Amino acid sequence: MEGQSTVLNRLITTVDNCIKDAVAAHLSETAALLRMAKIDLIIRANGINEEDMDVFMFMVESGLRLAEYINPPELLGQHKAAGAAS
């Protein structure tokens, strides 16, 4: 019996091939819908939960970069100043 990860990865590959076929057939709306399905499968395959997605969407909507979220510039400045003092 296949594990869920294996099944999801196989589905991602299949949907990716369908996207290529839809693009080649000039079915842009269909390709867009298939891309959304692929995103859903990738999210499930990586165990991303709703809270993770909410944080990510907030960052995108706010124009924040991940590096700034993890290491805010004001903290980086303090770190550099502490390193220069030693």
Image (spheres, grey):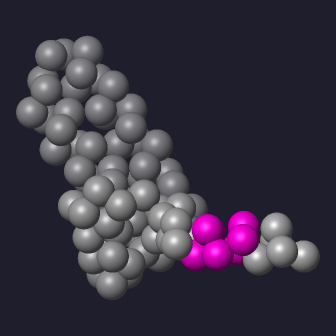
Most distant residue in the right direction? 86
What span is colored magenta in the figure?
A: 75-81
In the rendered image, the residue lying farthest to the front is: 85
Q: Quadrant of the C terminus?
A: bottom right
**Residue drawn at x 31%, y 33% as measured from the top left:** 18
- Residue 78 falls within the magenta-colored stretch: yes
Question: 64 or 33, which is in the foreground?
Answer: 64
Q: Main secondary structure of the magenta part?
A: helix
Q: Is residue 13 above or below residue 56?
A: above
Q: Is residue 9 visible?
A: yes
The image shows residue 20 at horizontal and vertical percentages of 33, 25
Q: Is 42 rendered above or below residue 44?
A: above
- The residue furthest left is 29
- Left/right placement of residue 29 relative to residue 48 reads left
- What is the total number of numbered labels drawn onto the structure image? 0
Image coords of residue 13 (percent x, y):
46, 43
Q: Is residue 81 above or below residue 14?
A: below
Quadrant of the image containing the N terminus: bottom right
Q: Residue 50: percent from the left, percent from the top?
A: 30, 81
Foreground: 70 or 2? 70
Q: Is residue 8 magenta?
A: no
Give the quarter of the image for residue 84: bottom right
Q: Going 26% across and 15% down the picture, which residue do you hit? A: 24
Q: Position of residue 34 (x, y in %)?
A: 23, 43
59 lies left or right of 14: left
Can residue 7 be seen here? The reply is no
Front one among 80 and 7: 80
